[in-house]
Image (tube, rainbow, N blue to C red):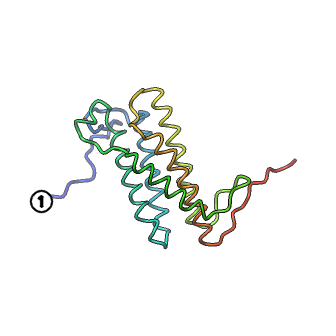
Amino acid sequence: MKKATVYTRSGDSGTTGLVGGTRIKKSDPRIHLYGEVDELNSHIGFGVSLLSKDFFKDFLYEIQSSLFDLGSNLACEKEKRAEFKLPKIKNALIEKLEKEIDRMDVELQPLKTFILPGGSLEASAFHICRTVSRRVERQMVDFEDQHPGEIPESALIYMNRLSDYFFILSRYINHLKNIKEINWIALKE
């Protein structure tokens, strides 16, 4: 069997193909949106590579897979998704995120002020995941405003929970490493 080439040359003119075969410009907001999902997935992969504890990794791999599911849906027009039997974000995954958030949060000190992103390298990586998740969420809202019905069901809820999860995960990692959180203090003139 001959190995497929990575390059196809079909995008050399500045267009790309959606799942259903439609060609659109690479500058289209849809491409930006699922490109942001891909960027988030890469940041998660970087964060996972820094972790020494395996008990986070399986769930993070599940999140990464779900982001591929989401990306495949965003790369396909709504009316063609059923034809391709694309996987959907399931409410069970959102519930699992909430349980993980609750499980970690119970061990953390309540916040009385905002904290600065940072701490350990691992926690910092997941703070980046949090902010990229929020960016994806904002772009989804904008895309839905421009193209009603194109954002898959539960996707906005999922992205909202995902950013919460990364915030708590970052705090939890610092907690496990005994790294003190730095409170935000407003600078005075």
Report the side of 137 relative to 74 (left or right): right
Report the side of 154 relative to 22 (left or right): right
Viewer-closest of 76 and 27? 76
Residue 81 vertical position relative to residue 67 in the rendered view, above or below: above
> To which quarter of the image does residue 30 belong?
top left
> How many numbered discs sit on the rendered protein?
1
Residue for point 41% across, 51% down: 93
Report the side of 83 relative to 178 (left or right): left
Give the percent coordinates (x, y) of residue 114.
70, 52
Give the percent coordinates (x, y) of residue 28.
41, 33
Circle 1 residues within 10 Å: few <14, some 14–19, many ≥20: few
Furthest toward the left, the residue is: 1
Residue for point 30% across, 45% down: 87
Residue for point 55% across, 51% down: 164
Give the percent coordinates (x, y) of residue 35.
42, 44
Residue for point 27% across, 44% down: 9
Q: Which residue is mark 1?
A: 1
Give the percent coordinates (x, y) of residue 122.
55, 65
Report the side of 126 relative to 180 (left or right): left
Q: Secondary structure at mark 1?
A: loop
Viewer-closest of 37 and 9? 37
> Which three-letter amino acid code belongs to the residue tagged 1?
Met
Quarter of the image containing the N terminus?
A: bottom left
